[in-house]
Image (cartoon, grey):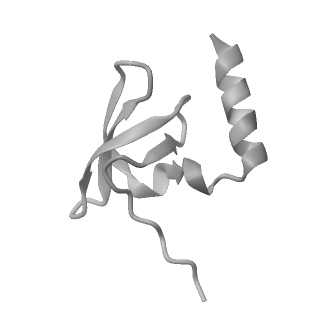
Amino acid sequence: MAKKKRIPKVGDHVSVTGRKGAFIVSSVDSYSESAEMKQIGHDLRLSTIPWRDVTFLDELDESQNALRVVREATED
């Protein structure tokens, strides 16, 4: 049985394929299956991001999430 694809909701914390950093979903368009989001701690906003390019941060296991936090903290 195939796993059902999770649909983003306003307020979800996510990462986006091809982008650095964590984002918060600010709006969702179910017709186009895309979302608008804002980068956490920055002014960057992304528009029309396809759901397939979104990874939910609460679905990462602890080691992946810790690695992401360390990597982002040391990049700047």
Q: Is residue 6 above or below residue 10?
A: below
Of 6 and 61, nearer the camera is 61
> Which quadrant of the structure image shows residue 20?
top right
42 and 19: which is toward the camera? 42
Q: What residue is shown at x 72% (from left), y 53% (from top)?
A: 61
Number of marks in the rendered image = 0
Question: Does 37 sit above or below residue 7?
Answer: above
66 to the left or right of 5: right
**Residue 45 falls in which quadrant of the image?**
top left
Indicate left or right for 4 with 61 as reference. left
Q: Quadrant of the N terminus?
A: bottom right
Residue furthest out toward the bottom:
1
Q: Is residue 61 above or below residue 21?
A: below
- Find residue 19 and report its horizontal and vertical position in percent: 52, 32
Q: Residue furthest top?
A: 76
Q: Residue at x 58, y 83 (%)?
A: 2
Instruction: Give coordinates of residue 42: x percent, y percent.
Output: 41, 19
Q: Position of residue 55 (x, y in %)?
A: 54, 51
Q: Is residue 66 above or below residue 55?
A: above
Report the residue that reaches farthest toward the right.
Answer: 63
Rendered residue at 66%/19% (across/down) = 73
* Residue 60 pos. (x, y %): 66, 52
Q: Which residue shows up at 54% across the image and 42% down it?
A: 17
- The C terminus - image quarter: top right
